Image: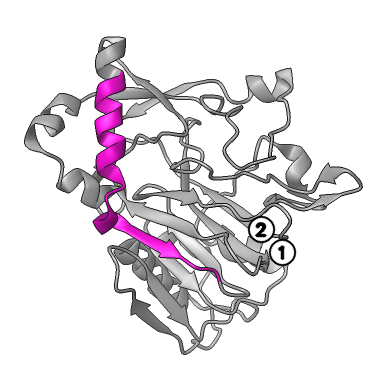
Amino acid sequence: MPAASLSATPSRNPSQHFDVRPLDAALGAEVLGLDLSRPLNDADLARIHRAYLDHGLLILRDQRITPEQQIDFSRHFGTLQIHVLKQFLLANHPEVFIISNIVENGQPIGLGDAGKFWHSDLSYVELPSLGAMLLAQELPPEGGDTLFASQQLAYETLPAELRQRIDGKRAVHSYTARYADEVFKGVRRPTLTQAQLAAVKPVVHPVVRTHPETGRKGLFVNENFTTHILDLPEDESRQVLAELYAHSIKPEFIYRHQWQPNDMLFWDNRALIHLATGCPSHLRRRMHRTTIQGDVPV
């Protein structure tokens, strides 16, 4: 989305003084001194947007904000998407999806195993996520790290032969591809209703997508939602995907985030994939996610 569309009307709010500090990693930057509980002007938003495109992941430190403030900030970057698991949407704020292992009155309050496989959020819909914002509400004393991997670096370093094999190819993505697989011990996902299944029918996207704002190419397949590559025999599709997955998460492409209280991460699902490492089931963890709609991958 062009920076000019970030704000519908000019803002006269004074600029905030904040620093953007690139991480010593393949991606990401810390944003220090920004206060999302205060109004932002157009220059602030443009600077955040530019940093987001440059680094793929922003760590917005010490954000003591309400759900309304998270939603308002997220909407500067586009329309918000509502998750299909409506039982885990925040009461009175359906734009906020709860990711949590906490159980109250015998029922989970959020999705306990979100991100258990490498993935790009909502790659299984026609308009996948542009980006997501994840705000720490309650953190465990150990575990709970989140890993991010640059799929643009992964594509740019592909062996020439593998790059040729995927040139022009398209792949199928499905929300249910690995939905029932149990990875985090003791955590099982709720059974999907017929209405929920109807809302997440498989879609087709290019194996390599061009970022709509930067023009940079990156891999756009992931082990969580991609089922197969079209126009390839089943065994060859499986082999090519396995090679792509193995290459896409090489250590040199990865940043591991160790959460601090009130961190909010803002990442680009068009450029990165990510993975939740999980935490011991007896330790409480709660996060609030807003998800921004993107466009059709090309």
- Main SS, magenta residues: helix
Give the crowd class for mark 2: few <14, some 14-19, many >=20 residues within 10 Å: many
CB under 8 Å between discs 2 and 1? yes
Q: Amino acid at mark 2?
A: His
Q: Which mark is in front, 2 or 1?
A: 2
Give the residue pinned by disc 1: 67
Q: Nearer the viewer, residue 210 or 141?
A: 141
Highlighted magenta segment, given as a residue range: 238-259
Residue 288's label in the rendered image is 2
Q: Relative to 134, is 235 above or below?
A: above
Residue drawn at 56 percent across, 25 percent down: 176
Q: Is residue 141 left or right of residue 157?
A: right
Q: Is residue 157 left or right of residue 293?
A: left
Q: How does the figure colour the protein chain or chains?
A: one colour
Q: Quadrant of the C terminus?
A: top left
Q: In this rendering, does residue 215 appear at all?
A: no
Q: Relative to 153, is 14 above or below?
A: below
Residue 223 lies in the magenta-colored region: no
Mark 2 → mark 1, Cα distance in angstroms: 8 Å
Secondary structure, mark 1, is helix
